Amino acid sequence: MLNTVPGKKLVITVESNEQWHGQSLYSAIVEKCRKGGVAGATVTNCVEGYGSHHVLHTTRLLSLCDNLPVRIEIVETADRLPEVLALLDGMLGKGLAVVYDVVILKESADPA
């Protein structure tokens, strides 16, 4: 049987070549979440996008495809979101971060 739990999804978009202490920023974020016990984090490569400076990054033009956007999605229960944000404090200088309300579906343990 599925149970529902109120949750939050934090979506962070950064440039793929951004670094954090010698490693890619997106990898550093995922690793920090994993070590911090966050429920889940996923990184997706994007094929096109631009940010606040309106510089287009796209796979359509070879000269512009070296720094594509990367999307990091982090899901956690609503009550733990402040802990997640505290883990990532100081890491999101140029990126965009958005929080969505979600419903997490969890399989309940069989009482048998």
Image (cartoon, helix red, strand yellow):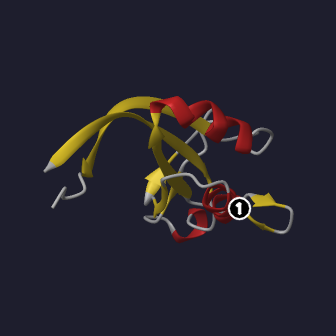
The image quarter in which residue 36 lies: bottom right
- Judged from this view, the residue extending furthest toward the front is 112
- Judged from this view, the residue extending furthest toward the right is 21
Q: Is residue 34 visible?
A: yes
The image quarter in which residue 87 lies: top right
Picture residue at 43% right of the left edge, 64% below the top: 60
Residue 58 in the image, given as x and y percentages of width and height: 49, 58
The image quarter in which residue 17 lies: bottom right
> Which amino acid is tagged 1?
Ala
Residue 11 in the image, given as x and y percentages of width and height: 49, 42
SS at mark 1?
helix
**Label 1: which residue?**
28
Q: Is residue 88 visible?
A: no
Residue 72 in the image, given as x and y percentages of width and height: 52, 52
The C terminus sits in image quarter: bottom left
Picture residue at 32% right of the left edge, 36% below the top: 5
Picture residue at 56% right of the left edge, 46% below the top: 13
Q: Nearer the viewer, residue 66 or 33?
A: 33
Q: Is residue 41 left or right of residue 33?
A: left
